[in-house]
């Protein structure tokens, strides 16, 4: 049974602006790195013809049940895998890390820096990272160092959120 949850329009607005110049037709494979019903609702709506891997930390029932209750699309597969163990031979057109980094050390024993390495090691054309600018869990100095090794396509700041679109 579907619940009455509604996606926060600010999240959708920011994500639409971030991806507005990406050629939707060329995007076949997407990784929702640190998935949940907000990012997955956006991705399934914005890229309806793509195959999406929705990655959650193993046993994260909060996110699994939110997705099961609220995401009606069928172009995604849910995977419970620690990002640190993710198969880096897989190739994606888009990787989205929407509010992942704020939980980088919530479940895993690995450091924030190791999470960044894991995220930036994934083979993808575009990497989008969105977080709360004032989130003390997000090390923006380290994030910007990683981003600076690639090309920034876009930065969007909206409400309390900042999003980066990186071309790899
Ligand atoms: C705040 S939630 C993200 C919400 C989601 N992107 C959305 O917009 O609805 C953080 C997500 O990161 C995942 N996560 C945290 N640490 C992880 C790790 N080491 N490996 C894989 N996923 C992780 C959690 O399971 C959860 O799905």
Image (cartoon, helix red, strand yellow):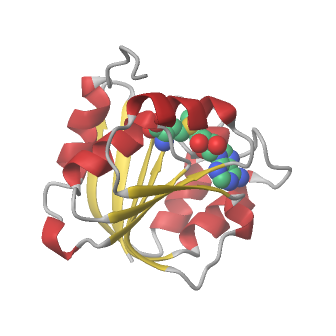
Q: Is residue 79 above or below residue 98?
A: below
Q: Residue at x 57, y 31 (%)?
A: 65
What residue occupies the far bottom of the structure in this picture?
89
Image quadrant in which the C terminus is located = bottom left
Q: Residue at x 69, y 59 (%)?
A: 81
Q: Is residue 161 above or below residue 167?
A: above
* Residue 4 point in image, percent of width and height: 36, 14
Image quadrant in which the N terminus is located = top left
Q: Is residue 11 left or right of residue 100?
A: left
Q: Nearer the viewer, residue 3 or 153?
A: 3
Q: Is residue 138 visible?
A: no
What residue occupies the far front of the structure in this picture?
1
* Residue 43 point in image, percent of width and height: 31, 50
Q: Is residue 95 visible?
A: yes
Q: Is residue 6 above or below residue 79?
A: above
Q: Nearer the viewer, residue 98 or 42?
A: 42
What residue occupies the far right of the structure in this picture?
109
* Residue 130 point in image, percent of width and height: 42, 45
Q: Residue at x 31, y 32 (%)?
A: 11
Q: Is residue 147 left or right of residue 25?
A: right
Q: Nearer the viewer, residue 47 or 136?
A: 47
Q: Residue at x 66, y 39 (%)?
A: 103
Q: Quadrant of residue 105?
A: top right
Q: Is residue 152 above or below residue 72?
A: below
Ligand 1 image-quadrant field = top right
């Amino acid at each position: 049974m579907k619940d009455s949850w509604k996606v926060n329009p600010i999240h959708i607005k920011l994500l639409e602006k971030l991806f507005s110049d990406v050629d939707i037709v060329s995007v076949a494979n997407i990784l929702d790195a640190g998935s949940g019903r907000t990012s997955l609702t956006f991705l399934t709506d914005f890229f309806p013809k793509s195959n999406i891997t929705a990655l959650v930390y193993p046993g994260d029932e909060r996110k699994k049940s939110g997705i099961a209750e609220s995401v009606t699309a069928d172009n995604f597969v849910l995977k419970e895998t620690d990002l640190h163990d993710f198969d880096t031979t897989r190739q994606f057109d888009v990787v989205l890390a929407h509010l992942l980094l704020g939980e980088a050390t919530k479940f895993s024993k690995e450091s924030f820096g190791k999470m960044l390495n894991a995220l930036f090691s994934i083979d993808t054309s575009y990497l989008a990272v969105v977080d709360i600018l004032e989130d003390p869990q997000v090390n923006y100095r380290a994030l910007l160092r990683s981003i600076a090794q690639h090309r920034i396509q876009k930065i969007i700041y909206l409400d309390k959120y900042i999003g980066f679109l990186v071309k790899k």
